[in-house]
Amino acid sequence: MFGRQFNDIASKDSTLTRLTAEAKELMKLDRAFQKLLPPLLVGSCRAVRIRDDELVIYTDTGIIAARLRMLAPSLLPQLAKQGFIAGKTRVKVDVRLARKPREKKLKISQNALDGMEEAAASVSNPLVSAALAKLIAHHRK
């Protein structure tokens, strides 16, 4: 419903029509770029534009940027076949793209924690006992 309302508004304003078309083209570029990437890099970077014969790519870490600098030139001919023509690449690091940390999914049952607590009491090494106590306290939260 919202998309339909936006299209109605955008079709009445020439600036919005142009911006909508450009945004769709940029999203199409990024989708094509993502399909060419190795699985470990998918989603960790964005192809943001082609301007002055240069494909600009943003990523959130320097390690991925280094890998992209080596890989990107080999992707240019494949992108050109899809209509995205660029002769060179520029990779930029933008920490604002950093992914949010994943939510902790590991759950230890209360019975298991109780058993770990009993075991921690019988351990003679104080470092191991302290580490177990810390782990148990963390998971009881």
Image (cartoon, rainbow, N blue to C red):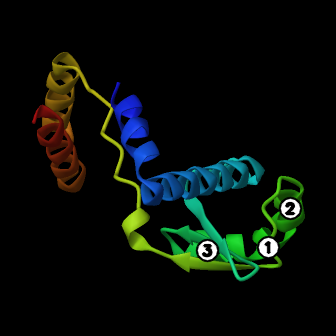
Comparing 49 with 124, the one in front is 49
Q: Give the image quarter of residue 30.
A: bottom right
Amino acid tagged 3: Ala
Circle on res. 57: none
On the image, the x and y values in percent for residue 36 come to: 77, 52
Amino acid tagged 1: Ala
Q: Quadrant of the N terminus?
A: top left
Q: Which residue is mark 1?
A: 86
Comparing 35 with 70, the one in front is 35
Mark 2 touches mark 3? (CB < 8 Å): no
Mark 1 touches mark 3? (CB < 8 Å): no
Mark 1 touches mark 2? (CB < 8 Å): yes
The answer to whether one can see residue 41 in this image is: no
Q: Give the image quarter of residue 139.
A: top left
Upstream in the sequence, badge 2 or badge 3? 3
How far apart in space, not on screen, are marks 2 and 3 (Cα)? 21 Å
Q: Which residue is mark 2?
A: 80
